[in-house]
Every structure is written in structure tokens, then in C-alpha cells.
Amino acid sequence: MDEHPRPPQVVVLDVNETLSDMSPMAARWEDVGAPAHLARQWFAEVLRDGFAVAAAGASVAFATVAAATASRLLADVQPGGEEREAAVAHVIAGFGVLDVHPDVPDGLRALRASGTRLVTLTNGSASVAVDLLERAGLRDEVEAFLSVEDAPRWKPAPEAYAYAVRRCGVPAAEMMLVAVHPWDVDGAARAGLRTAWVDRRGTDYPAFLTPPELTVASLTELARVLDPAGA
């Protein structure tokens, strides 16, 4: 890795898990009588089924997949009808109260202060990203909140990244996708974007996916790497 890589014109930020700390979602499942571990299984299955629809050449709203998957996973602990509908609503509402990871505020502010343009690109609703950063006092650091609902396929389909490139008006090679998800990094790299993998847990990157240009432990580290003079 270049010790001082050339800063991109635009940093494209994934939202769910990259910016948002989703660990409190486990308590939402416990609130409705389900085991906490279903939170991670649920999110993984939502992504899996959304990817499957994208691979078939179609698209579906994240909220639709999330609710249907939650309802199916709650079948063993909640009766049908209004009780399960209420439980699903309680789980999904957890997205609306999540906080950002501790490194996100300083990281985004440092990136923005260096002159880098910041946008988000999510498989979910753009409004969720807006609300997340609004709660964190970071709304004004981001110039655009993009969603694959307008792409029209979920990441990591190439159309999703191409949509971001069109919206930002710069070449793909001048944009850097930043995500905690290796599948997102791989998809962006295949679409011609530069990439940074945020590895907060010290895990191994899958050898069968396109490696990231940069690997960092936090967004603050990313800002230091891209602008060492501003650190």
C-alpha cells in the first residue's frame, strides 16, 4: 500500500454497519421474546435475499425484505396476526434510533475538512441515512444521500456504483467506496472505484474477493491516511 495514497475527490460511504452501530438491534429482538443472536442472522438474511433479487435483474425495497424476513424469523416466538406485526414493527423501528460508531464524527469531519466530498450510498432508504447523521450532528458534512432505490439494483451490482458515479459527476477512479463489508468493497472495485475496508474487529479479508486499496481500523484512521498533513 502506498504510504501516502492520492486522496479521492469523493468518498462514498456505506451506511448500515459502516456508519451505524447496529449492536443495539439485538435488544430489539429480545424485547419481543426472541434470542438476541437473531439480530445478526436477520440482517444477513435480508442482505442475502436482496442480493438474490438483484442477481435476477430486479430490485425490491430494503424495508420490504427486512419486514418479511423479521416476520418469518419471529414465527417460532410470536403468534400470527397483530401480535407478530407489532413485533416486526418494533424490530424495524430500531433503525430509527441507532447511533454512529464512535470514530464516525471525527472521521467524517476530518475528511470533509481536507476538502473531500462525502456522499452515502445505501441498500436501504436514503432517509434512514439522513436521520442517522442528523442525530449525530453530521448532516451537513455529507453533500448527498444516495440509495440503490434509484440505481435500480442493490449493491454490489455494478448499476448501484454507476448510479453514484453519475450523481457525483466525477470519474469512478476519483471515488473511493468505504465500507465494513468485503462484498461491497469487491463490488465497488469491479465497478472501477477505489476502495477502503474499515476493519474495526481485526478480521481477515476474504481471499477470493478483490482486495481493498486501503485497510483501516476506523474512519479517523482513514482521514489520517488520506490527509497526513491534516492529522
Image (cartoon, helix red, strand yellow):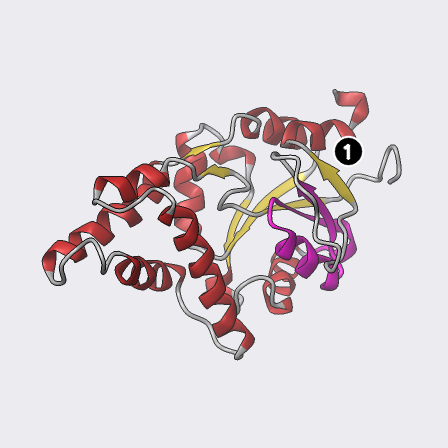
Which residue is located at x 47 percent, y 35 percent?
A: 139
Image height check: is 46 above or below 134?
below
In what element is the residue under mark 1?
Answer: helix
Which residue is located at x 77 percent, y 31 percent?
A: 225
Image height check: is 224 above or below 29?
above
Viewport quadrant of the N terminus = top right
Residue positioned most to the left = 82
Residue positioned most to the bottom = 56
* Magenta range: 170-198
Which residue is located at x 69 percent, y 44 percent?
A: 204
The answer to whether 100 appears left or right of 6 in the picture is left
The answer to whether 121 appears left or right of 66 in the picture is right
Image height check: is 22 above or below 64?
above
Which residue is located at x 61 percent, y 58 percent?
A: 164
Residue 122 place in picture, x, y as percent: 51, 53
Residue 49 place in picture, x, y as percent: 45, 67
Q: Which residue is mark 1?
A: 226
The answer to whether 196 appears left or right of 50 in the picture is right
